[in-house]
Amino acid sequence: MWRSKHDGLTAAVSVGGERVLLLKPQKLMNRSGQSVRPMLAFHRLAPSDLLVVHDELDLPFGQIRLKIGGGDAGHNGLRSVTTELGSPDYLRLRFGIGRPPLEFEGDVTDYVLQGFAPMQRAGLQELVGRAADAVVLVARFGIDAAMNQVNRRCTV
């Protein structure tokens, strides 16, 4: 199913009855746009056809939100995608991981790269399932309808 292409692993799947291309960039996060840009170019897709699923510090763990465009909020992967595409106008599925607790020793990068806490791991499977459901909604009904449904019920 997965093939090596565009400096990443790619697959074509059916999501909600729609053909969807998946890409797991195999570059460092801060260079992930170097995988995204050639894939979009190869398939003649516009940035507006792209849905990037990413971790989000500014959402508490257990929340997911859909969004169209915007800034990178310090996220190096989003910065890379925006730079490579020349546009921030792509869809995003924001996967809330929350900010580090006050007692956390280390910087934000250390926090983002560590594993989930045991209490978070207990709800992770449900959250991943809801994120996958959000992707299906986007594929079947479009971003506006998906945002109306996903963004109003955003906690685990």
Image (cartoon, rainbow, N blue to C red):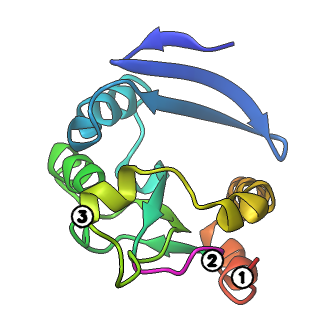
Q: Residue at x 65, y 36 (%)?
A: 20
Q: Tell me where the magenta segment starts and ends, as one range.
A: 58-63
Q: Are marks 1 and 2 in contact (CB under 8 Å)?
A: yes
- Secondary structure beneath label 1: loop
For the residue pair 142 and 75, the one nearer the viewer reads as 75
Instruction: Using the image, tell me which numbered label, if any, was put on residue 63.
Output: 2
Residue under label 3: 106
**Residue 24 falls left or right of residue 30:** right
| Mark-to-mark CA distance, 1 and 2 | 5 Å
Residue 101, position in %: x, y?
A: 41, 80
Q: Nearer the viewer, mark 3 or mark 1?
A: 3
Residue 137 visible somewhere in the drawing:
no
Instruction: Using the image, tell me which numbered label, if any, was put on residue 155.
Output: 1
Which sits earlier in the primary sequence, circle 1 or circle 2? 2
Residue 68, position in %: x, y?
A: 44, 72
Most common SS among magenta residues = loop
**Residue 80 falls left or right of residue 11:** left
Residue 119, position in %: x, y?
A: 70, 67
